[in-house]
Image (cartoon, helix red, strand yellow):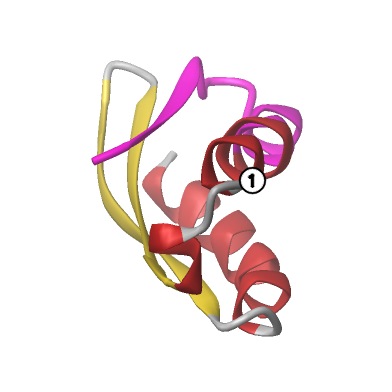
Amino acid sequence: MEEQVKTVLMGIRPLLQADGGDVELVGIEDGIVKVKLVGACGSCPMATITLRDGIERILKEEVPEVREVVSV
């Protein structure tokens, strides 16, 4: 599952990088993907929306074992 998550995140990263941000995979535990939003995404007021409506939605679609995505 970790490789699948990494592959999906690699596809998402250019979108975040275009706005000056990025996402780093911290770890996966019991279907919960832990990520860190960095750069502009780390301090953006829209970070929660980016995390839930973007990153989490796409990961759940592509990797059914993902239950939740949290920012750490």
Count of numbered circles on the image:
1
Along the viewing direction, whichever of 28 and 19 lies nearer the viewer: 19
Image vertical order of residue 21 relative to residue 2, above or below: below
The stretch of residues the image draws in magenta is 56-72
Instruction: Give the quadrant of residue 12.
Output: bottom right
Instruction: Indicate the position of residue 67 as horizontal and vertical percent values.
Output: 50, 15
Kindly identify the residue that appears in the image at 39 percent across and 60 percent down: 42
Name the quarter where the C terminus is drawn. top left
| 25 part of magenta stretch | no
Q: Residue at x 72, y 33 (%)?
A: 53
52 sits to left or right of 57: left
Instruction: Give the residue number, with chain letter if any, for mark 1.
Output: 50
Q: Quadrant of residue 32?
A: top left
Instruction: Tell me what residue is drawn at x 70 percent, y 84 percent.
Output: 18
Horizontally, is 30 left or right of 8 in the view? left
Q: Residue 27: image x %, image y %?
A: 23, 44
Residue 48: x, y in percent?
54, 36
Q: Is residue 20 left or right of residue 36?
A: right
Q: Is residue 51 left or right of residue 32?
A: right
70 relative to 22, above or below: above
**Given the current orientation, which residue lies at the most extreme front position?**
45
65 within the magenta span:
yes
Q: Nearer the viewer, residue 55 or 27?
A: 55
When the figure is inspected, residue 61 is found, relative to residue 4, above or below; the finding is above
Kind of residue at badge 1: Thr
